[in-house]
Image (tube, rainbow, N blue to C red):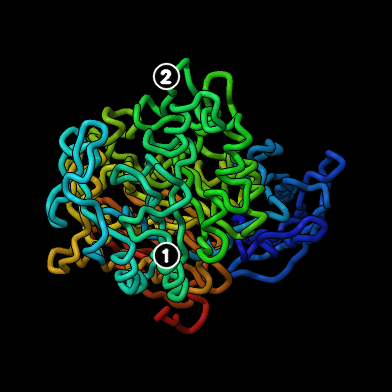
């Protein structure tokens, strides 16, 4: 007996049900079992059973379904499947097919009445570090020698020059990328297939990274100010592109108006916004320019997110209509000794902001398993280092960043993960979060906080790298492309500065093979079936794994391969369409033999195929 389910449109309808409604849940079987039951945790604290009946077929599988009520009291609704075949009983859950009843942690779940940013699952994101992307207005920007800060002086290097180290530049080397420059490149992003932009902080600040906010309430005038930001969002929306902005409400900069008032007047309201040990402020991670905010202050909460004119509400309201917030160092917020306010603050942030904009996207920065924050009451998602960047970089042969020095910016080489280890890393992350939340994860390889994988010359192979790109675009959720990765932007290992080179706009210096892969995968994600399709991830052997996205009558199948020899791999076609096949990306030949799809691959190469039960497949463009 073969069984297949993933929380997806083919199997759950509606995907985001409301309390007091009902939901139809289906499961695919290779043949109809003697008995099939859907078991749910009911509102009496007991397990209830619903008989599953044949609904039809999906591809070559029997589809059995049951419709069950969701009560008003259901905050999280757990379920799993039971079936009896040839007189033997089995259970099916996130843990797969077992003989024992699955524990609650392994049961599928639904969060009813979830304020879901459904657009995220349909999106492909592009991360922009504003100072390094594009300069559009020569009248804007920092001026050479404009001020001194933290032991350094403002410099304005040429846009095509290599960034200096932190100790030389002190994060004061302004390349003067700006908002008009971003606006001018919206057509480029649209052509690439981008439908969302994640922007690093743009509030007024002293440094190029702008995590040291002077004023949360205004966009840095050197970038173009509030009006330019409003124009960016308006023009992006006209092109079908959403905007997510970074904010660090864990701390401010030492030049913040609030912090200066706190130092000047110990009796001021602002003094209560910060932690002080006597006269010494507590700072994030010991960085003396980043004093930590104290959320015991109700007045601080009002100014950051509660009030209509607060920092976080201002930009999601008219005239801006921003679509999301990326939440910097989010697991560290509100933690200071006995103060452990993290979850209390994030729960309030969600409550106040989602009341304004139900489909607002709240994505936390967390490098670890974030399941505690993704239960429908805090973040929608996390930057998925844990379930995307870290396992895929390990597949390519990097030692995990937390086992290396320098905050992971000088990673060591080690034997790469095999396919089974990589699949486990990917799947463990997916099943650790509520089933709906997997579609909101921000999947990535690189960011402003990591060295660029393609610049790790000790392990880089373009062919294997293209497989990594394919993999993270195929995962449930939203892929996020760090600016320039699509063209193999230059950089080095060793520091964050080495991963923040200015964008190269000379197309003659782009790697068009890589650019073509990114574009092909972004266009694939626009196919109507893709966003909330079922997913299946499995190892084929030590050197190849498959990621499948499947709906009724159509599927995308990626083979991610690092074998140094030309060879064949095969995958079981259970619950997959197979009447017609087409190579979407890569060089591969495929045939069907004994109920399996056999794919012939060149050495080190990966490929994406489209499978269909119709007579042909229509291109996205």
Q: Position of residue 105 (x, y in %)?
A: 64, 37
**Which picture quadrant has residue 618?**
bottom left
Q: Residue farthest to the top?
A: 278
Q: Residue at x 83, y 39 (%)?
A: 45
Q: Position of residue 63 (x, y in %)?
A: 67, 65
Q: Position of residue 381 (x, y in %)?
A: 53, 48
Q: Can see residue 292?
A: yes
Vertical order, 49 against 590 (above or below): above
Task: Report the disc number at residue 55.
Answer: none
Vertical order, 255 against 279 (above or below): below
* Mark 1, residue position: 227
Q: Secondary structure at mark 2?
A: strand
Q: Residue at x 40, y 50 (%)?
A: 203
**Which picture quadrant has residue 192?**
bottom left
* Mark 2, residue position: 280
Vertical order, 236 against 7 (above or below): below
Which residue is at the front of the view, 437 or 275? 275
Q: Quadrant of the C terminus?
A: bottom left
In the rendered view, does 291 fall on the left or right side of 269? left
Q: Earlier in the sequence, mark 1 or mark 2?
A: 1
In the rendered view, does 493 fall on the left or right side of 254? left
Q: Residue at x 38, y 33 (%)?
A: 254
């Amino acid at each position: 007996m073969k069984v297949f389910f993933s929380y997806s449109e083919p199997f759950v309808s509606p995907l985001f049900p409301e309390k007091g409604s009902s939901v139809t849940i289906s499961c695919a079987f290779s043949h109809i079992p003697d008995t099939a039951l859907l078991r749910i945790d009911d509102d009496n604290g007991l397990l209830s059973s619903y008989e599953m009946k044949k609904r039809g077929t999906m591809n070559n599988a029997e589809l059995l379904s049951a419709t069950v009520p969701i009560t008003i009291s259901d905050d999280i609704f757990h379920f799993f499947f039971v079936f009896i075949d040839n007189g033997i009983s089995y259970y099916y859950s996130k843990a797969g097919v077992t003989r024992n009843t699955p524990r609650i942690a392994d049961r599928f779940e639904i969060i009813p009445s979830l304020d879901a940013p459904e657009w995220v699952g349909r999106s492909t994101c592009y991360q922009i570090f504003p100072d390094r992307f594009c300069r559009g207005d020569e009248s804007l920007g920092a001026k050479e020698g404009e001020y001194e800060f933290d032991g350094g002086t403002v410099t304005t290097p040429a846009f095509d020059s290599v960034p200096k180290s932190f100790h030389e530049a002190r994060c004061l080397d302004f390349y003067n990328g700006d908002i008009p420059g971003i606006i001018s490149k919206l057509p480029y992003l649209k052509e690439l297939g981008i439908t969302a932009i994640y922007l690093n902080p743009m509030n007024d600040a002293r440094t190029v990274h702008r995590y040291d906010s002077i004023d949360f309430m205004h966009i840095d005038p050197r970038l173009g100010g509030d009006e330019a930001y409003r124009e960016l969002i308006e023009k992006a929306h006209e092109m079908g592109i959403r905007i997510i902005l970074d904010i660090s409400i864990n701390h401010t900069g030492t030049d913040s108006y609030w912090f200066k008032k706190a130092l000047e007047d110990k009796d001021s309201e602002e003094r209560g916004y910060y932690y002080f040990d006597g006269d010494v402020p507590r700072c994030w991670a010991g960085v003396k320019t980043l004093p930590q905010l104290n959320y015991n202050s109700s007045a601080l909460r009002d100014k950051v997110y509660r009030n209509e004119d607060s920092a976080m509400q201002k930009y999601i309201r008219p005239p801006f209509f921003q679509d999301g917030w990326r939440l910097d160092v989010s697991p560290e917020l509100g933690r200071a000794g006995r103060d452990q306010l993290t979850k209390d603050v994030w729960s309030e942030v969600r409550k106040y902001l989602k009341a304004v904009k139900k489909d607002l996207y709240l994505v936390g920065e967390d490098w670890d398993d974030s399941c505690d924050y993704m239960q429908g009451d805090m973040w929608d998602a996390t930057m998925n280092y844990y379930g995307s960047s870290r396992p895929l970089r390990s597949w390519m042969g990097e030692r995990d960043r937390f086992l290396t020095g320098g905050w992971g910016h000088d990673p060591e080489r080690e034997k790469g993960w095999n396919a089974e280890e990589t699949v486990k890393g990917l799947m463990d992350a997916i099943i650790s979060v509520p089933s709906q939340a997997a579609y909101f994860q921000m999947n990535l390889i690189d960011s402003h906080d990591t060295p660029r994988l393609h610049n790790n010359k000790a392990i880089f192979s373009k062919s294997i790298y293209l497989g990594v790109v394919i993999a993270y675009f195929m995962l449930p959720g939203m892929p996020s492309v760090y600016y320039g990765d699509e063209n193999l932007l230059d950089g080095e290992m060793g520091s964050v500065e080495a991963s923040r080179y200015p964008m190269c706009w000379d197309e003659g210096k782009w790697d068009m093979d890589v650019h073509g892969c990114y574009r092909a995968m972004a266009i694939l994600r626009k196919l109507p079936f893709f966003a909330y399709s079922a997913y299946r991830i499995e190892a084929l052997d030590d050197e190849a794994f498959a990621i499948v996205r499947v709906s009724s009558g159509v599927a995308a199948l990626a083979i991610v391969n690092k074998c140094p020899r030309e060879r064949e791999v095969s995958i079981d076609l259970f619950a997959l369409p197979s009447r017609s096949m087409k190579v979407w990306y890569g060089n591969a030949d495929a045939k069907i033999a004994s109920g399996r799809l056999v794919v012939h691959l060149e050495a080190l190469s990966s490929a994406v195929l489209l499978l269909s039960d119709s007579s042909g497949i229509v291109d996205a463009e």
